[in-house]
């Protein structure tokens, strides 16, 4: 079936091939049908569209039992130094075909196509093709190659051009010429077509002038030279009188009779002497010269040496300026594409009705109260806790946060001195001011924004990130004996039952894998923890238990429920961004500044950002859509990290195109080794394909809380209440700032249900 924009037609391998072939035309569609196909129907079938001169070909092979080669023309005519084709076409493309110069000289270096033959440079001789199927060999017909040798000729305009075309060794021949600017007259009646048949024994030398139509300036005739009695010879002459420029082009002479047809094509180039048609002055020192000729003439202008040197210097300067500008543009483009530090946390301002587009508050427009400022003289910097490509986090002691004589251990974020990074740190500062304090958030304690580098002062968490904490203490993990495991308990563990196990005391702990600090809680001044404060610790056990893993999950859900109630998206929720404090209290943060993201395998560079793709939801990866539901997906990945004791997500899938394809197919991770079935069910709910099918953080707080003991939830409630009502630096300084940001938020366009959840500290 062949179709085009206009009517199409078929060309068959052989003009005489009509038996068993039927063509059905349906407008611009043509259907070729072959009935009772035999080896004779093998060959190349071409479909042509007349209006566009476009064509498509298809090779059809129908093997014959004995007839391997298809019949084709015996002669090959080609111009000297051009490639030709030996058309030894086969009915079976599986045959091995070789080419020989007669009698038996192998020919190599030619390209072979079963539907076309051998193509390449040929000699003026005869060729033979041999096909083999491993059992027998069959030779093709003999192919004769005739090379047309002609000297290159150039004609001047107005000269007379005479071209002769001669054919020998045939009884009868007709000629046809095709050339540019040919005038096509009305066709002559058959009775006016003349030909010459000259027997070998005849000795006369007749001359015959044919009536082939030519323009008035051309002459075409046939002549038979004298003394030629052995074989007939026919010649057609094309004469162009007063050659014109528009007659440049390809000329074709065709000789044909009832048995065969051959064509010779040559190119005629008409030359015209160069001539200046106009010379004018455009402006001072600028002249316009217009010339014509064939081939197009080149112009040469004479300058004075002084003017020429000035032009050369000016050209050199312009080239250097151009190269410099291009170099600077390339540098700027590379600098803009270079990933840079950005605040992952985003505050939602509005959502489109379909929930597919989010508008975020510009953090630079959020208010900042100078009450948060801390005098630089009150800060004593300590060791570096972590550093990355954009900045670092250092340990420090700050005096006067609670009262004039108090000292509090803190963590200080600072960035490298470039405007983009400083602006990002200021945005992070304003977002933390906007959020306000929470027990499970690394809270803001103060800042230094004047008279030096920007410092962002936050709570200090002595045990470092949750991934490192789990990896360091997995050997102390209390696991029930395998014989005691059963599905009957619903995946719960008896938290009140003591089990006798051997364990190794926890090694020294660190903040982001840096040297350990002196024992501190994140929300008390420097010094030892009092007995009353120790009563509020969530856990004082040195062991890592299943209850602890549930506690970590519960606390992170509380933090994310708080963020969602403030219409804030985290966008990088992972165990590496959860810090562990004394008493196994965990706090959510954004610790990306302290990591070298260029070397971190958890992040992939995309444009100007580093993305944690293994923690991202499909809509965030493929559609760049971030929502509270995408944070819920990340929470499911974090649960997998917790209950695999710090394992890396998708351990069996490399972070290549295979990962993205697997995610699109709906691939999800298996249950981690230490996860109860109820926790794994929560993970799968968080990994639902449709964001609206995922649970909210409010429901996750309830679901995980139901797996914990009432005693634990009571202690957590007391700790949260003590945090908000006690004299904690984050709470006191937030009160001093007047909670201006939250008051403006209350009058905003959102309710607490914007992220499908609200914060409830009593849970």
Image (cartoon, rainbow, N blue to C red):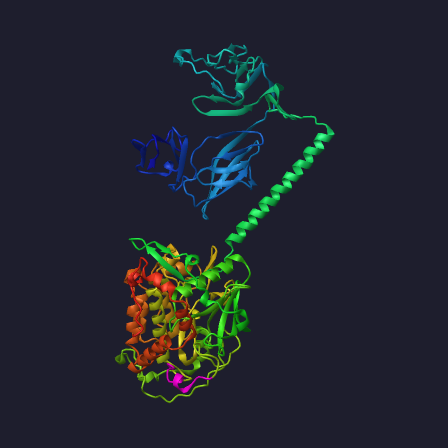
Q: Where is residue 253 drawn, in percent x and y?
A: 50, 21
Which residue is at the front of the view, 692 or 252? 692
Left or right: 440 as drawn, with respect to 172: left
Which residue is at the front of the view, 281 or 212? 281
Kindly identify the residue that appears in the image at 52 percent across and 57 percent down: 419
User: Looking at the rendering, in which quadrant would you find the N terminus?
Assistant: top left
Q: Quadrant of residue 703?
A: bottom left
Kindly identify the residue that appears in the image at 37 percent across and 36 percent down: 41
Q: Where is residue 325 drawn, in percent x and y?
A: 59, 44
Q: Residue furthest left?
A: 488
Left or right: 165 as drawn, with respect to 345: right
Magenta-drawn segment: 528-538
When the figure is inspected, residue 352 is found, relative to residue 14, above or below; the finding is: below
In this rendering, the count of numbered labels is 0
Q: Main secondary structure of the magenta part?
A: loop
Q: Residue furthest bottom?
A: 500
When the figure is inspected, residue 557 is found, relative to residue 124, above or below; the finding is: below
Q: Is residue 148 magenta?
A: no
Q: Where is residue 707 drawn, in percent x and y?
A: 29, 77
Q: Quadrant of residue 29?
A: top left
User: Looking at the rendering, in which quadrant would you find the C terminus?
Assistant: bottom left
When the figure is inspected, residue 166 is found, relative to residue 493, above or below; the finding is: above
Q: Is residue 529 magenta?
A: yes
Q: Residue furthest right?
A: 305
Which residue is at the front of the view, 555 or 727? 727
Left or right: 195 as drawn, with respect to 625: right
Query: Could one spot residue 173 in this view of the protein?
Result: no
Query: Could one spot residue 623 in this view of the protein?
Result: yes
Q: Where is residue 656 drawn, in percent x and y?
A: 44, 60
């Amino acid at each position: 079936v062949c179709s085009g924009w206009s009517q199409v037609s078929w060309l068959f391998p052989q003009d005489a091939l009509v038996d068993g072939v039927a063509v059905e035309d349906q407008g611009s569609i043509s259907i070729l049908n072959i009935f009772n196909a035999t080896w004779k129907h093998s060959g190349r079938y071409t479909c042509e569209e007349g209006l566009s001169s476009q064509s498509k070909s298809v090779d059809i092979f129908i093997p014959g039992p004995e007839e391997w080669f298809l019949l084709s023309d015996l002669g090959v005519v080609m111009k000297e130094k051009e490639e030709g084709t030996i058309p030894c076409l086969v009915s079976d493309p599986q045959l091995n075909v070789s080419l020989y110069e007669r009698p038996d000289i192998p020919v190599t270096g030619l390209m072979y196509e079963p539907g076309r033959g051998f193509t390449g440079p040929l000699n003026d001789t005869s060729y033979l093709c041999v096909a083999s199927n491993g059992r027998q060999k069959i030779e093709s017909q003999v192919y004769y190659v005739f090379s047309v040798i002609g000297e290159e000729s150039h004609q001047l305009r107005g000269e007379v051009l005479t071209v002769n075309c001669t054919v020998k060794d045939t009884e009868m021949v007709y000629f046809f010429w095709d050339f540019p600017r040919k005038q096509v007259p009305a066709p002559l009646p058959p009775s006016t077509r003349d030909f010459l048949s000259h027997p070998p024994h005849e000795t006369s030398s007749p001359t015959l002038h044919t009536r082939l139509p030519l323009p008035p300036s051309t002459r075409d005739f046939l002549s038979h030279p004298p003394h030629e009695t052995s074989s007939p010879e026919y010649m057609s002459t094309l004469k162009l009188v007063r050659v014109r420029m528009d007659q440049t082009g390809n000329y074709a002479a065709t000789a044909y009779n009832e048995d065969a047809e051959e064509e010779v094509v040559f190119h005629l180039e008409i030359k015209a002497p160069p001539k200046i048609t106009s010379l004018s002055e455009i402006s001072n020192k600028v002249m316009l010269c217009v010339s014509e000729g064939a081939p197009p003439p080149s112009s040469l202008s004479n300058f004075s040496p002084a003017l020429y040197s000035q032009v050369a210097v000016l050209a050199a300067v312009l080239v250097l300026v151009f190269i410099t500008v291009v170099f600077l543009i390339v540098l700027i483009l590379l600098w803009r594409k270079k990933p840079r530090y950005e605040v992952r946390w985003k505050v939602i301002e509005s959502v489109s009705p379909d929930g597919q587009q989010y508008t975020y508050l510009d953090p630079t427009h959020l208010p900042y109260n100078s009450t948060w400022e801390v005098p630089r003289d009150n800060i004593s910097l300590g060791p570096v806790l972590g550093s990355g490509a954009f900045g670092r986090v250092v340990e420090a002691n700050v005096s006067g946060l609670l009262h004039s004589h108090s000292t509090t251990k803190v963590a200080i974020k600072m960035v490298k001195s470039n405007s983009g990074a400083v602006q990002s740190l200021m945005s992070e500062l304003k977002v933390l001011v906007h959020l306000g304090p929470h027990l499970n958030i690394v809270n803001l304690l103060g800042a230094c924004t004047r008279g030096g580098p920007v410092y962002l002062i936050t709570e200090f968490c002595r045990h470092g990130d949750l991934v490192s904490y789990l990896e360091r203490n997995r050997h102390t993990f209390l696991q029930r004996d395998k014989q005691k495991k059963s599905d009957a308990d619903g995946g719960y563990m008896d938290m009140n039952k003591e089990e006798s196990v051997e364990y190794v005391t926890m090694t020294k702990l660190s903040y982001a894998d840096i040297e350990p600090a002196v024992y501190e809680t994140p929300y008390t001044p420097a010094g030892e923890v009092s007995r009353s404060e120790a009563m509020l610790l969530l856990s004082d056990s040195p062991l890592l238990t299943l209850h602890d893993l549930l506690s970590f999950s519960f606390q992170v859900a509380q933090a994310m429920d708080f963020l969602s109630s403030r219409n804030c998206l985290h966008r990088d929720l992972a165990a590496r961004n959860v810090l562990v404090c004394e008493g196994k209290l965990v706090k959510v943060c954004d610790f990306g500044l302290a990591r070298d993201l260029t070397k971190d395998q958890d992040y992939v560079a995309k444009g100007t950002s580093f993305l944690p793709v293994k923690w991202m939801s499909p809509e965030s990866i493929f559609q760049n859509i971030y929502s509270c539901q995408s944070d819920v997906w990340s929470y499911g990945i974090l649960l997998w990290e917790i209950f695999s004791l710090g394992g890396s997500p998708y351990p069996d899938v490399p972070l290549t195109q295979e990962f993205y394809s697997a995610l699109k197919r709906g691939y999800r991770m298996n249950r981690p080794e230490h996860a109860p079935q109820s926790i794994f069910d929560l993970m799968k709910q968080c990994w639902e394909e449709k964001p609206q099918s995922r649970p909210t953080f409010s429901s996750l707080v309830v679901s995980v809380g139901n797996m914990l003991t009432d005693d634990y939830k009571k202690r957590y409630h007391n700790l949260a209440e003590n945090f908000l009502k006690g004299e904690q630096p984050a709470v006191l300084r937030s009160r001093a700032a007047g909670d201006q940001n939250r008051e403006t938020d209350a009058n905003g366009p959102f309710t607490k249900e914007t992220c499908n959840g609200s914060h409830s500290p009593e849970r």
